[in-house]
Image (cartoon, helix red, strand yellow):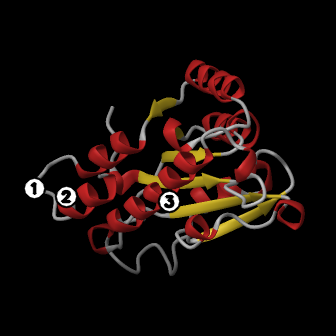
Amino acid sequence: MLLDASESQLVLVDYQARLMPAIFESAAVLANAARLGQLARLMGVPVWGTEQNPSKLGENAAEVRALCDRTLAKMHFSAVEEGLGEWLRPPVKAPQGNARSLPKHLQKPAEPERGMIVIAGCEAHVCLLQTALDLLEDEFDVWVVTDACGSRTERNRDAAFDRLAGAGAELVTTEMVAFEWLRTAEHPDFRAVQALIK
């Protein structure tokens, strides 16, 4: 199954300024996170951010925070425990008026659900892992962008990827996301996306 931009949402987990210097290959991880946010903005994909204990670890890096529609401050390692699921799947509104007010074919269709969650973040084996596992449990399709994830050690990061793949998450890269969202070189945003990737 390929990613579909119209069914996707992007979650960027804990790219906090005080944490990033300790992350293995942090410059590449942060650059890919920002690239993902820019791609999502270009393609009309909602972008959500999380920050773990921001009073101690500070806000997300400015280049990531600026791309997020909203940022969730949290204390639990899993952002789902703090309400991220409600952001990703807002409650269905009850129909207004009586049942006979409009024929069914004239009623406005419900907003389609965006159940494909593209997620990346730090630390991969803690906050990213626990958030992604909870999203899988909540029956979202979860796509983990490996080159935009980091931990302090390579071993912890890779162990998180193994566990996530075993739990049913798809492991992808930033370029895979970009070209699956595009689907064709004839897409109107193809050149802009290509410029972000190069």
Name the spot of residue 66 as percent of width and height, x first. Answer: 56, 73
Disc assigned to residue 34: 3
Kind of residue at disc 2:
Phe
- Choose the circle earlier in sequence order: 1 or 3: 3
From the viewer's perspective, is 10 left or right of 40?
A: right
Query: x%, y% of residue 159?
Result: 67, 21
The N terminus appears in which quarter of the rendering?
Answer: top left
Label 3 is placed on what type of residue?
Answer: Ala
Q: Which residue sits at x=53%, y=44%?
A: 148
Q: What element carries label 2?
A: helix
Which residue corresponds to mark 1? 186
**The residue under label 1 is which amino acid type?**
Glu
For the residues bearing labels 2 and 1, Cβ distance under 8 angstroms: yes
Query: In the image, residue 137 lies at what x, y percent?
Result: 66, 34
Q: Provide the residue designation for mark 2.
A: 190
> Would residue 18 be seen by someone viewing this image from the given angle?
yes
Tell me the crowding category of disc 2: few under 14, some 14 to 19, or many 20 or more residues within 10 angstroms, Cα based. Answer: some
Of circles 3 and 2, the one toward us is 3
Query: Disc 3 on helix, strand or loop?
Result: helix
Q: Where is residue 12 in the image (x, y as percent from the top left)?
A: 59, 54
